[in-house]
Amino acid sequence: MNTIKRLAGFGAIAAVFTLSVSCGGDTLPKPKAYLRLDYPEGKYVPLEGDCPFTFGYNSQARVSRSKDCWALTLDYPKMKATIYLNYKPVNNNLDVLLMDAQKLTYKQVVKADDIREQPFVNADKKLYGMFYEVGGNAATNAQFYVTDSTSNFLSGSVYFYAKPNFDSIMPAASYLRDDMRNIMETVKWKK
């Protein structure tokens, strides 16, 4: 019985020693965590005004436009981002407009991991275009253009005010990509 008490005593001492040694020394800090960013579901409202087109945009955005509607911005202050839209009439220059839109997208190749092209066609509404998803730490993660191929051309891209670190802006980038896709799909030409 005495031997059992000794073994139990040694076991207790060994356990205390092991715990004190394992808990001591240098402790490592916990890794930094990122905030979980949740955004409200988009409620889309029609663009009002004298522009030669209209589309549905997220009511969370603040809209500003040039007098002639050639330049529009949808500002998202909570996300520190802006969607820039440019309108140009087509005057036998569709090839040039398409090349300019594609050139803007492919300037991102330097920082982009990949660029996915997604063609868009809605013949009933006379909408033809391309949606680009740019992966990686590029300045913009999404761009598009849409045209009726005879009179109207609208292009758009999203930019963040912060240094592009795709992992940390991914929730906002995803949200804005959906908004851009909605803009593209809801464009209606007035003439």
Image (cartoon, helix red, strand yellow):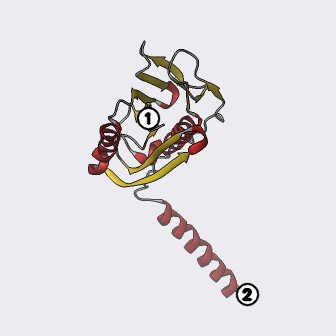
Point out the residue furthest to the top here. Answer: 67
Name which residue lies at 61% across and 39% down: 38
- At which x and y percent is residue 15? 58, 71
Numbered label attached to residue 1: 2
Q: Is residue 4 left or right of residue 142?
A: right
Q: Amino acid at mark 1?
A: Thr
Q: Is residue 151 left or right of residue 97?
A: right
Question: Neighbour class for label 2 at 10 Å: few (<14), some, many (≥20)?
Answer: few
Name which residue lies at 51% across and 20% down: 63
Quadrant occupied by the N terminus: bottom right
Q: Is residue 66 above or below residue 34?
A: above
Name which residue lies at 47% across and 17% down: 64
* Helix, strand or loop status at disc 2: loop
- At which x and y percent is residue 26? 40, 57
Numbered label attached to residue 150: 1
> In the depicted view, which residue is nearer to us: 70 or 163?
70
Q: Earlier in the sequence, mark 2 or mark 1?
A: 2
Q: Is residue 143 left or right of residue 179?
A: left
Q: Amino acid at mark 2?
A: Met
Whether residue 75 can be seen here: yes
